[in-house]
Image (cartoon, rainbow, N blue to C red):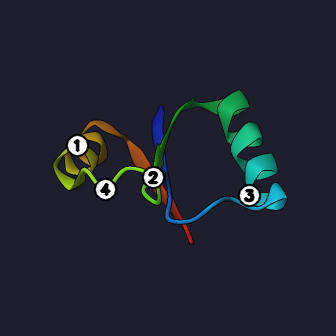
Amino acid sequence: MKVLEILRSEPSDRVKEIIEVHKKEADVEIFELYKNKDYSQLVDKIFEADKVICWW
């Protein structure tokens, strides 16, 4: 399963831990929205993923 994790802000230590657990179970890609505002690229990645998780 391909999972896209969207980070809207700098992740806390707890979020980083959860993402590491997800990496053990799936193919995880991280999109740092707070650094990269390329929304067309983000939309493409959303459609490529099986699951999308957005972190505030």
- Give the labeled residue for mark 4: 37
Outermost front residue? 35
Element assignment for label 2: loop
Give the x, y percent position of residue 5. Answer: 51, 49
From this view, report whether residue 7 is shown above or below residue 21.
below
Q: Taking 34 as reference, is 44 left or right?
A: left
Which residue is at a point 67% across and 32% down the rendered structure image? 23
Q: CA distance from mark 2 to mark 3?
A: 17 Å
- Give the labeled residue for mark 2: 35
- Give the labeled residue for mark 3: 15
**Which disc number belongs to residue 41?**
1
Element assignment for label 1: helix
Q: Taking 16 as reference, is 42 left or right?
A: left
- Sequence-earlier tag: 3 or 1: 3
The amino acid type, in three-letter code, at marker 1 is Gln
Q: CA distance from mark 3 to mark 4?
A: 21 Å
Q: Nearer the viewer, residue 54 or 40?
A: 40
